[in-house]
Image (cartoon, helix red, strand yellow):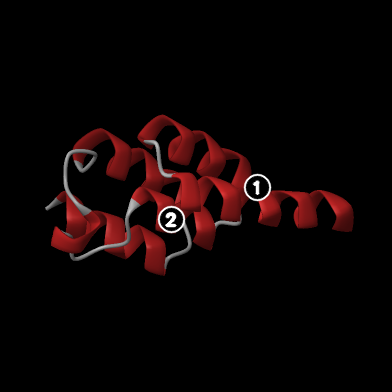
């Protein structure tokens, strides 16, 4: 049920709510086992690179951390 709700919220571009539900109810699921975007994917869709960096760091996901850091720098340079 949580995956369906996350999918719906992502379609409605309600990323903050989708991310909260994903982290609360789906954090122990592997991305390959899910039928909805992962927390990292939701952050990317929302262009929330600061949150993505935090999540990647907590999970030890070096590749996502570096990619999000680069995107965050681009984001800061544009504003």
Give coordinates of residue 60: x percent, y percent. 39, 36
Q: Residue 50 falls in which quadrant of the image? A: top right
Up/down of 58 relative to 45, above or below: above
Q: Nearer the viewer, mark 2 or mark 1?
A: 1
Give the secondary structure at mark 2: helix
Q: Which residue is mark 1?
A: 69
> In the displayed structure, does residue 8 sit left or right of residue 77?
left
Dot 1: few (<14), some (14–19), or many (≥20) neighbours within 10 Å? some
Residue under label 2, please give it: 42
Q: Nearer the viewer, residue 9 or 46?
A: 46
Q: Is residue 77 left or right of residue 55?
A: right
Q: Nearer the viewer, residue 42 or 73?
A: 73
Verify CB contact (< 8 Å) between mark 2 and mark 1: no
Q: Nearer the viewer, residue 75 or 11?
A: 75
Instruction: Say which residue appears at 36% left-offset and 36% top-offset.
Output: 59
The span from disc 2 to disc 1 (Cα, nearest Å) is: 16 Å
Callout count? 2
Quadrant for residue 3, please give it. Answer: bottom left
Q: Is residue 34 above or below residue 27?
A: below
Residue at position x 77%, y 50% from top? Answer: 73
Give the answer, above or below, for where 27 lies relative to 77. above
* Horizontal arrangement in the rendering, residue 42 relative to residue 7 (left or right): right
Going from N to C along the chain, the mark reached first, 2 or 1, is: 2
**7 vs 33, nearest the viewer:** 33
Residue reaching furthest bottom?
Answer: 11
Can I make out residue 27 in this image?
Answer: yes
Q: Quadrant of residue 10?
A: bottom left
């Amino acid at each position: 049920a949580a995956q369906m709700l996350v999918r719906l919220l992502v379609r409605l571009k309600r990323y903050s709510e989708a991310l909260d539900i994903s982290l609360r109810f789906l954090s122990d699921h592997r991305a390959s086992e899910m039928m909805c975007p992962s927390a990292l994917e939701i952050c990317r869709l929302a262009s929330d690179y600061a949150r993505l960096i935090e999540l990647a760091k907590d999970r030890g996901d070096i590749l996502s951390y570096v990619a999000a850091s680069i995107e965050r720098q681009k984001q800061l340079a544009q504003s």
